[in-house]
Image (cartoon, rainbow, N blue to C red):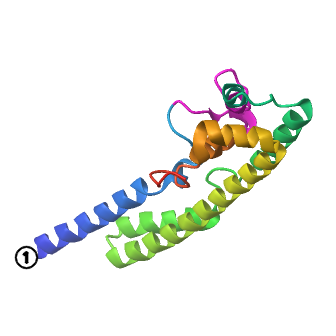
Amino acid sequence: MHLRKRSFGIAVVVLIAMCLLAASPLSAQGMRGRPGQRMMGPGGAAQGVQGNPLAMLQRSLQQAGAAALTSDQTTSLTSLMTAFHSNQPAPGQDPVLTNARNALDSAILSQNTGAVANAAGAIAAETSKLQTQQIEAEAAFEISALMVLTSAQSSALQTNLGTTGLVRVLGSMIGGPGMLGRMGGPGR
């Protein structure tokens, strides 16, 4: 009987740890978007196929029959991208999350399911806070980028791509939509 309780406790701890690892995309901060989308390049800049973070927007404008970006728009968008990436926290530098993960490790090694639950709660709360901040920062960038476009450009893009497509094009300049921000949600 004692062995069965101990095995059950260990199984619970392992299950909780696996759930935390699977549900914590911030453990791989910096990974954004979907396979085939732009990835983060040196210095945090989003890189397209040819290393141009504006490539998807430029191509979408052309396909929509809208006016190309002016040099002033290109400069403004480049400044917004630089500011966005400069304000992103360094991966793995959140002390609350680091401490909670260390507490989880200790709880697992000491086979303390109560401490595992406490650490899991701390990890979940901090992860949620960080994800909310990331989604808000991405949305603020996308709003600012949209304001750089003319109404004719944004209308043509929305007509051609739809609302969700337009937002994804805006997000492509910073590496694509956030993994949790729009993943699996209904289209807009």
Residue 59 on image: x %, y %: 69, 26
Q: Could you tell me if residue 173 is visible in this image?
A: no
Give the residue drawn at x 12%, y 70%: 3
Q: Foreground residue, 9 or 151?
A: 151
Span colored in magenta: 36-57
Residue 81 on image: x %, y %: 78, 42
Q: Foreground residue, 61 or 131?
A: 61
Which quadrant holds residue 116?
bottom left
Q: Is residue 43 magenta?
A: yes
Left or right: 174, with 32 as reference point: right
In the image, farthest residue toward the left: 1
Would you call the spot at circle 1 few (<14 residues within 10 Å), some (14-19), or many (20 or more)? few
Q: Which residue is mark 1?
A: 1
Give the residue drawn at x 16%, y 74%: 5
- Disc 1 secondary structure class: loop
Quarter of the figure that contains the N terminus? bottom left
Q: Is residue 6 magenta?
A: no
Left or right: 176, with 12 as reference point: right
Give the residue drawn at x 54%, y 47%: 28
